[in-house]
Amino acid sequence: MEKTVRVGSGAVELVETLPQALLLEIMTKLDLESICSLAPLCKSLRSSVSKSLSSLSKLDLSDFSPTICVLNGLVGKNEVIKSLTLDCRQLDDSSIKVFAKESIQELVLLRCSMFSSYVFSAIGRKCPRLRMFTVEMSPDYECESVLAYNNAIGQMLQSCLKLESLSIKLHFGNPTIQLILPKTVKALLLQPVFNRQAMELIHSMRSGESDAYFPGVGMSSLRPMINCLQSLSLVLTKITDELLFIITSNLQLLVELCLEDNPPEEPSLQLQSDLSNNGLQMLGTSRNLIRLSLTRDRSSKTTFKRVNDVGILVLAEGCKRLESVRLGGFSKVTDAGYVSILHSCKNLKKLQIVNALLLSDLAFHDLADAPSSIVELRLISCNLITSETVELLSLCKKLQVLDLSGCRSVADVGLNAISRLCKLTTLNLCRADITDAGLSTLGGGRSPIETLCLRGCKRITDRGIVKMLNGDGLLSKTLVSLDLGYLPGASDKAIVAVAEVCKELSNLCIRNCFFITDKSISALGSPERSKGKRSLRKLDLFNCCGLSSTSFRFLRSPFFCGLRWLGVGSTKLLDKGKDRFLELARDKPGLSICTNGCEIGCKDGWQFHECI
């Protein structure tokens, strides 16, 4: 039976006597969901909720996909909102009149699948104060021509004369979109773009040349003033020396450069068509760079074979102001190259290295002489990294994020050092060689870990998870997001412990855990669990083949109050079709249900399927 909220007449009378200014002040301390839940209780609260919503200056709705009706209730009467982020999967052109406000300065439109080109021209007319605009879109080029998108985007940019940051991500196809960029733009992200056309784009920023066209995103009639660009992010076909030469020659004020590529085939060594030491040498002349990312997509079968330690050394010597470095796919770079970054960049705060085949523990032996300012370290799929590196990281007292996913030689001994890091909030040990004993150590440590990933750690069992959660350390009290996916030794005992102990848990992934049964779902969604605990917001059950079709009853109200995303692909929950999930989504507004195999939130691959 569904639980209802009842308010005694005395309580109602008391609320009615409170000054509205006091009620509004109280509501400033609450999150959006809590504010909205007050509206049905009494007339005074309903009026205060309406005024509170109409006075919000910032609103982030990226966690769920609102309908136009819900969106209208949240922002319809708000004429002062300055920053708005939307998940647009359920929104079409008719919703633009609701969210496009004259007061908007920052607008982020994510997962747009039903908008036409009209969205651009409408935003241009309705949001003249726009300073930051981000759009992630899957256009329907069968219904509209590329010319229609060209015209609409051009109208928007001509009207938004205060625009400082522009980010355009387009999925599907390689259309040629023509843009005229305002001279005020200081940050630009384009995805996708061919490398040759990207070079023409950057050159035109300096020279003011016109008629430059680009698949995915293109530009024309660019003013010479645009060489004041400070941040450039491009997803390309291929990163080359020529591209870096044009960037360094034309954009001397860059403080942030992010380049990612995915060559369709192995670049020819004979034609010297790939990035080499020469390109990094030219990049080393960009003395103002603070953030740098050079990566080859992990799905690519190729690596940067023409770059070795010399190129990285020259780059590090030239760009000593770097605070954030991300390198991926440099298969010929050894410890010496990475050491040069650690020791030359004295202000380094974030370092991410992906698929470094030759990176070993030796690179971190002299951490005492390296920057003490490092707060984020990600060593992803670096197979030679062992627990020795993790022990050395105990010297990094400011470390907040540690990602060792794919480092299969990290074992229990490394967890002793990790448990002593007093500022560590994010830890990824995906596919590490840790056991139950290591988890027990971690659970008794001083690290206030909020996000923990143990995915694919095949030596972990229920016993270790229970010990970790019942330890006398901070972890069980601070844990917000937990990934226990692909654990063959995890069963109901571990998940019931999670449900009982983790009061702050918001996101849980247990995909591909074959021994999870209905008992776990009942424990996680139980109304009793919600007493004194945070409601679970996102739950991934993909391929939990131990679940029965009847466990669906534990997804209905009053179970899982507050759930925003649910992944049920490849489970018996779908045996009776999707109709009952459609009904569930109607009963729980704001809940997105994924019947495919997406990771939590459908952040990648959303354009390929529909969520319920």
Image: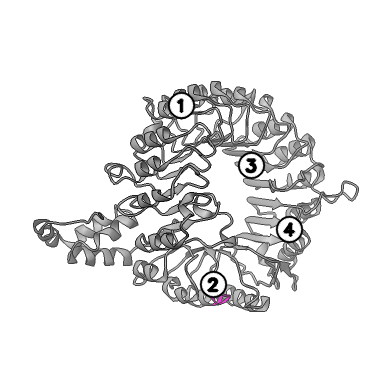
Asked if the residue at tag 2 contacts the one at tag 3, i.e. Cβ–Cβ closer than 8 Å, the answer is no
The location of residue 149, given as percent across then percent down, is: 63, 75
Q: Which residue is mark 3?
A: 325
Q: Residue at x 55, y 67 (%)?
A: 113
Question: Which mark, residue 464?
Answer: 1
Question: Which mark, residue 434?
Answer: none
Q: Is residue 416 above or below residue 482?
A: above
The location of residue 317, given as percent across then percent down, is: 72, 37
Under tag 1, what secondary structure? helix
Under tag 4, what secondary structure? helix
The location of residue 398, given as percent across then percent down, is: 50, 32
Q: Which residue is mark 2?
A: 115
Under tag 2, what secondary structure? loop
Q: Earlier in the sequence, mark 3 or mark 2?
A: 2
Say which amino acid is labelled 2.
Phe
Magenta range: 114-121
Q: Residues within 10 Å of mark 1 (few under 14, many from 20)?
A: many
The location of residue 227, given as percent across then percent down, is: 68, 61
Q: Quadrant of the N terminus?
A: bottom left
